Image: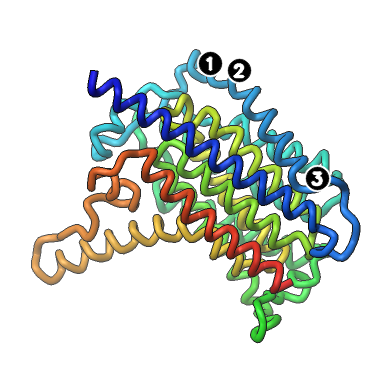
Amino acid sequence: MIAKGRRKHRIRLGILNNLGLIVFLLALLLFVDWCAWKIVRQPLAPFYLSRPFFISTALVSIVGYLFVPFLNALKVHQNVRNEAPVRHHKKRGTPTMGGLFFIPIGIGVAKLIAGFSSVEVSGAAVATVAFASIGLLDDILSLIKNHNNGLSSQIKLFLELAAGTLFAFWLDTTSISSPYSMKMLIPLPAPLGLVCLGKCYLLLTSFCFVSMGTGVDLTDGLDGLAGGTAALAFVAMSIAVLPICSELAIFGASMAGACVGFLLHNRYRASIFMGDIGSLALGGGLAAMAACTGMFFPLFISSGFFFLETSSVIMQVAYFKATRWLSGAGHHLFRMAPFHHHLELCGFEEPTIVAGAYVVSCLLALVAGYVGLISA
């Protein structure tokens, strides 16, 4: 009876996390739509950002009720690592590869609303699909091998780097409407202003793709964690790029809505996981938005939680190797990496960790959006 009561409590917390996130995002997008004419200095269509957000949310949530049983019937189930926290072993048998239905809907809604003539939206969509393809290959290999190891980390990083490099070369040779990417400039707040990187802009683009793909992938370890933080990052980037490329802002709002619609099925306790096809695609989409507009600084701010997760893994490995070299026996800096697993082993409940991540990411999203607007 006690265990049953605790499960109900955690499920209620998961629902509250979702409701709080949806209310915050809708309020923020409606506020930006209300004063959008002050931001871009030109009239925009009513509900310019909230409309694609709401459409994607509704479509993904409805399609999810059809797609989740379909994946379950095909036995496309999540594999859990043996070294994962004990409570994660209860998640064996949960359907995965949810990115198969929410990523295409997010891209499709953006293309329909923004128009098929937008080069920036097309580039961001292709980059998202390319990273989703890498994730799909990784998920398929995991299912075939019947454990949680698909592509090796080296091959995955190589493919991400290759996709990011190809996007950088495309950006260098394509004429797009953003003034910053054409001149290889990055807008920063005063008194810094515009910073010219020249060809180093291409290197930064490749690094951004790899770091974002890896960051979202590592964050995808708890119910609703990656989807919610990614939705906040997409909304922050939509606000930041609105004065530079309003069509790309639609792409960000649509992808955020797709994430929120997916959260209705991925909140605690999750009925489906996004898989690498979803997490890598979200990272690629965020990186593409920054690369097409030069808004790398707002991206790094809004992705602060992804940076924390990635840094915890790097520090864990570096500390273990350093202590093993110095004393002959390796020691761990955290109980387990990424950082959300460390918090789990410290006794925090899964929905509580997710709620804390949402609060931090909400604050970072507000700062990132503001920094983007004053920089543009």
Would you say residue 261 is visible in this rendering?
A: yes
Circle nearer the viewer, 2 or 3: 3
Quadrant where the C terminus is found in the figure? bottom right
How busy is the neighbourhood of tag 3: few (under 14 within 10 Å), some, or many (20 plus)? some
With respect to residue 238, does 221 lie above or below?
Answer: above
Q: Nearer the viewer, residue 236 or 112?
A: 236
Could you tell which of marks 1 and 3 lies nearer the N-terminus? 3
Q: Which residue is mark 1?
A: 69
Q: Which residue is mark 2?
A: 66
Numbered circle sitting on residue 1 = none
| Residue 141 percent across, percent down from the top left | 44, 33
Numbered circle sitting on residue 47 = 3
Q: Nearer the viewer, residue 265 or 100?
A: 265
Residue type (three-letter) at the residue carrying disc 2: Leu
Residue at left 27%, top 60%?
A: 317
Residue closest to the far bottom: 191
Left or right: where does residue 368 sit relative to residue 74?
right
Could you tell which of marks 2 and 3 lies nearer the N-terminus? 3
How busy is the neighbourhood of tag 2: few (under 14 within 10 Å), some, or many (20 plus)? few
Contact between labelled residues 2 and 1, with CB atoms less than 8 Å apart? yes
